Image (cartoon, rainbow, N blue to C red):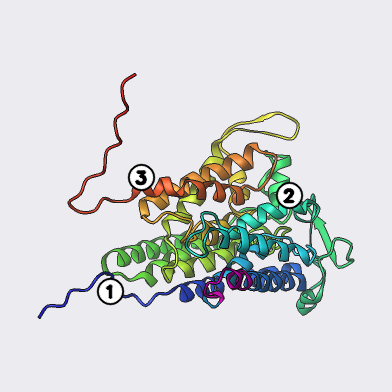
Amino acid sequence: MRVVRVSPHRSEGESIPLIMWTVVLALLPAFAVGLYVFGWRAAYVTVLSAASCVGWEALIQKLRGVRVTVADGSAVVSGVLLAFVLPASVSWYVPVVGAFVAMGIAKQAFGGLGANFFNPALVARVFLQFAFPSQVNMPEWPIVAPQVTGLARLAKSVAPGSPDAVTSATPLAVLKANPGAAWEAIPGSQPFGPPLAWLLPAGAAWAVFALLVAFAAAGIYLEATRGKRLAAVAGVGALLLFGVVPTGDISFGLVPGCIGETSAWALLLGGLALVYYRCINWRLPLAYIVTVAVLASVLPTRAGDGSLVVGFSFERTLVHVFGGGLFLGAFFMITDMVTSPLTSKGQVAFGVIAGVMAALIRLYAGYPEGVCYSILLANATRPLVDRLTMPTVFGSRRRAAPARPAG
């Protein structure tokens, strides 16, 4: 007797809790940098935001009469991401209110996990930006003073009036005021160069860079032909971390900004982990980052004095890629499984759409950072992108649009 069962016929062992808690672990490097740069307030805001999301979701699910699912980790992920896009100096009620907006309005009002159209953490961030503008949109952002070293940094406050805190504009805010500023003119930067350029003589650095390129190419080949995903992630990761990402406070994360967005190094490490565990599709963050980098390099913009800045600018690209929340958005927000397209082709198109939005907002709008709004605007296009890129069932044809009557 032949037994026929409905699909799926093969289980990979993945589950929602496993994916969500893997994302939480991948966020730990960025959290560690935030704790070092912003002191104990970073942990305070992050824990409060995550706990508030869990509490609000459990309460709302109880009131709705549905099963409480906070153990799956999705509320924790939203809470951590919400904290990561907030300054460490916000008052306690800011993440609590934001958590209610994220869980109650952006998620549960649509039916819960899997039914929401927009990323809950980003919806809450937009709400808080207008509800508490003086705490979320500051002209100068505080960090723990550089002279405070060692474990003492973890016990310091980043309150703007604290003697152990210093305040300055974020790299993107500096670039917004002067789009023609050189890379070295941005606070926290140093002459451009990846770690190889500083650790080795010029000839040896180029030789090691060539080896890293070969290692990455070999890893990609092994993954494509034999499914050796670890080889591809290790090869590409080593090339990016040691031969591409620049050194300096900007890419390390020792600059003013939101709790979890400042360190490109830490976020890249977490993103590579998500790619390895197949929690995200690498095509989506790559399309997003490359689109922003290309457009930021070639699009004209105006300087603070009103003069037009035209032409390719590699240094401007460095600030746009490494000086804001692009990596956090690329690896942990735009890749949200619920609010991103299903197919690889659709995810590439989705990343390009969001990248165009981010570049236009950063260059031409009054707000220096465009990651949050670009992802939310792209979320609105996701049903259309899915419809246009979803493959047809074998043996079927796409239904043609009905013809409009003449006249």
Residue 101: horizontal and vertical position, in percent? Answer: 66, 59
Left or right of 233, for residue 136: right
Helix, strand or loop status at disc 2: helix
Q: Read off the residue under disc 3.
A: 388
Amino acid type for the residue under numbered disc 1? Arg
What kind of secondary structure does the magenta stretch mostly adopt? helix
Magenta residues, as a range? 57-70
Q: Provide residue 279's location: percent of width, then percent of height.
A: 44, 67
Where residue 292 appears, as percent x and y from the top left, is 54, 46
Q: Contact, CB < 8 Å: mark 3 with mark 1? A: no
Judged from the image, the secondary structure of the residue bearing numbered disc 3 is helix
Dividing the picture into quadrants, the one containing residue 42 is bottom right
Q: Could you tell whether 11 is left or right of 72 in the image? A: left
Between 91 and 370, the one lying in front of the other is 91
Task: Residue 10: give its label.
Answer: 1
Element at label 1: loop
Residue type for callout 2: Phe
Alpha carbon separation for disc pair 3 and 1: 28 Å
Which tag, 3 or 1, sits closer to the chain's start? Answer: 1
Where does label 2 land, which residue? 130
